[in-house]
Amino acid sequence: MEKCHKCGKPMRLVVEDYKGVVSEAYRCRKCRAVIFTEEQALAFGKKYQQKLLKEKYEKHPVKIGNSYGMLFPRELVKALNLDSKKTRLEIEMDLAKSKIEITVI
Ligand SMILES: [Zn+2]
């Protein structure tokens, strides 16, 4: 059970809408103070980032030397750490569906 940092009373687990994202948090029964545990804050951060991303991006393939690539929007690069040297992308194709699935590993 979480205790309120202001008045020391027990806090209640609530599920509420913060900035348009439904998230778990603890609210004090007495003074109404709201806190996120580390886990709740991380979950909220991920959901909030997800909300900022579009569901679909449509781009033309870009010629790079003899190959072709796709440019990723900046917000996608940030959300998935694509700018890290450790990030690798795994590509799977489904020719029947004209689909390319990219997994960040
Ligand atoms: Zn309180």
Image: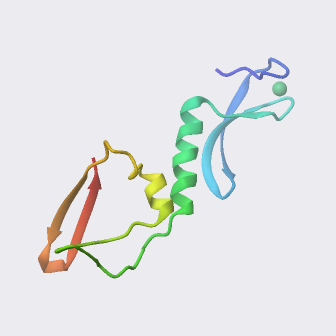
Q: Depth check: 28 or 38 in front?
A: 38
Q: Residue at x 69, y 55 (%)?
A: 19
Q: Position of residue 5 (x, y in %)?
A: 78, 21
Q: Position of residue 44 (x, y in %)?
A: 58, 45
Q: Depth check: 99 or 77 in front?
A: 77
Q: How many marks?
A: 0
What color scheme is it?
rainbow
Q: Quadrant of residue 9?
A: top right
Q: Depth check: 54 or 28 in front?
A: 54
Q: Farthest residue toward the left?
A: 96
Q: Quadrant of residue 94?
A: bottom left
Q: Position of residue 75 (x, y in %)?
A: 51, 60
Dividing the image into four equal quarters, which quarter contains ligand 1?
Answer: top right
In the image: residue 58, left or right of residue 66: right
Q: Quadrant of the N terminus?
A: top right
Q: Farthest residue toward the front?
A: 65
Q: Position of residue 78 (x, y in %)?
A: 48, 53
Q: Residue at x 39, y 79 (%)?
A: 58
In the image: residue 28, left or right of residue 41: right
Q: Residue at x 61, y 30 (%)?
A: 37
Q: Residue at x 53, y 51 (%)?
A: 47
Q: Farthest residue toward the top?
A: 8
Placement of 94 over or under 45, stated as above or below: below
